[in-house]
Image (cartoon, rainbow, N blue to C red):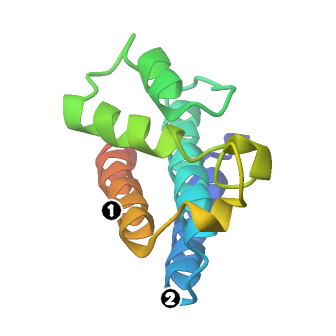
Amino acid sequence: MNRWKDWYDQGVRDLARAQVDVDHAFYEWACFTSQQAAEKMIKAVGLKRGVTLWGHSLSELLSLLAASLEIPADIVEQAQTLDLYYIPARYPNGFPSGKPADYFSESKARGALDAARCIQRFCESLLS
């Protein structure tokens, strides 16, 4: 059974959660959750195409898909932005001092949401 739709639907749900995090000023979590949403949507594309993708780097996942699919440069750039949020948004040792909340702003969180939404539109174009 190919579960690509489950992966995609959870990615959509994660993106909705990222918006809640922005609305409640949990900006570091909005950045991480946006990355997670995009990861699940990209993995859904892989599954639908018969490719199981492993790992968490969005740009790496896209490069694996690029073997059989054209990936626009702007999608790769959005993925690279979100890749920056996978670890530092969650762990205090991602920075020399302070906690992640000290380093993430509303503008970064909104940028992460925008990047994930861009990836969502790209994935939807391949899944429909």
Disc 1, disc 2: CB below 8 Å?
no
Residue 77 versus residue 108: which sits nearer the camera? Answer: 108
Name the residue located 41 percent from the left edge and 34 percent from the top edge. 80
Residue 47 versus residue 97: which sits nearer the camera? Answer: 97
Amino acid type, mark 2: Asp
- Is 105 drawn above or below residue 47 in the view shown? below
- Judging by the rendered image, the residue that carries numbered circle 2 is 23
Name the residue located 61 percent from the left edge and 66 percent from the top edge. 102
Disc 1 to disc 2, C-alpha distance: 14 Å
Name the residue located 35 percent from the left edge and 61 percent from the top edge. 111
* Residue 13 % position (x, y): 59, 71
Q: Residues within 10 Å of mark 2 (few under 14, many from 20)?
A: few
Residue 114, numbered label:
1
Residue 32, numbered label:
none
Q: Choose top left, top right, bottom left or bottom right for residue 110.
A: bottom left
Q: Residue furthest top?
A: 67
* Residue 59 % position (x, y): 45, 28
* Residue 16 % position (x, y): 53, 76
Q: Residue furthest front?
A: 97
Name the residue located 61 percent from the left edge and 56 percent from the top edge. 32
- Is 28 drawn above or below residue 122 in the view shown? below
